Every structure is written in C-alpha cells, then in structure tokens.
Image (cartoon, rainbow, N blue to C red):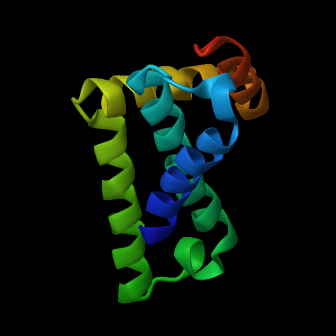
Amino acid sequence: MTGGILAHEFMHAWLRLQGDRVSRLNPEIEEGICQVMGYQWLDWFEAVDPEASSSRSEKAQFMRNLKKTFKGEVENMLDGAYGDGFRDAQWAVSRYGLDHVIRHIIRHKTLP
C-alpha cells in the first residue's frame, strides 16, 4: 500500500519538475494520472512478488485481499479529481499507453 501511495506522490513530484509546461493542471488531470501511477505500481508489485500470486499462506491471502480492496477503492472513488480523474486517465492509458498520455499531458495539459 505504501508503494502505491509513494508512486502517486512521486508522480506529483515529477510533474512539478516539468516546470511551467504542466503548471496549473486541472486537478482531475493531475490527480487522475497520479492515481493511475499508484494503481499500476500495485499491479507491478503483485506481478513481481512470487508469494503474492502463488502462496496459499494466510499472510499472502491477506496481502492479495488488501491490494484488491485498495484497487477497488481507487476504481470506485466518487470524488471528481481522484475518482473521475482516475477513470478518465486509466481509460486513456489503456487506449494510448502511459508514455503517450504523459507526453500529451505535458504538451496540452489535457488527456488525449
């Protein structure tokens, strides 16, 4: 969970490092792409953690349920910036790919 939150916050930091090119982003755009980064980190971590996918231990089952719950909360969040922003950014990333979406945000301050 901490990794997903850090990925989200690191994306905010990275956007700030882009300077004026992405200053004053619409909160739905910024929070949406940051939520996508945290969500994708959880997917990545689950894929590289051998115990997470194969173990039947109580701890592994707890971790799988915790990740599933956290991802469900992100997917179903009602807040405009975090919820709608995530769903819009997630759709764009699934359609165009993460690199393209980030480049588009930097150039146009919008999602493709």
| Corner quadrant of residue 52 | bottom right
- State the count of labels: 0
Q: Residue at x 43, y 88 (%)?
A: 57
Q: Where is residue 78 in the image (x, y as percent from the top left)?
A: 21, 29
On screen, residue 76 versus residue 98, left or right, reads left
Q: Residue at x 49, y 23 (%)?
A: 24
The answer to whether any part of residue 93 appears in the image is no
**In the picture shown, does residue 33 fall above or below 11?**
above
Q: Which residue is drawn at 56% across and 26% down?
A: 23
Q: Position of residue 111 (x, y in %)?
A: 59, 15
Residue closest to the eye, 24 or 89:
24
**In the picture shown, does residue 104 fall above or below 2?**
above
**In the picture shown, does residue 4 fall above or below 99?**
below
On screen, residue 107 versus residue 92, left or right, reads right
| Corner quadrant of residue 16 | top right
What quarter of the picture does the C terminus occupy? top right
| Corner quadrant of residue 84 | top left
Residue closest to the eye, 73 or 35:
35
On screen, residue 2 versus residue 92, left or right, reads left
Q: Position of residue 1 (x, y in %)?
A: 41, 67
Q: Residue at x 65, y 63 (%)?
A: 47
Q: Position of residue 30 (x, y in %)?
A: 49, 31
Residue, far front: 20
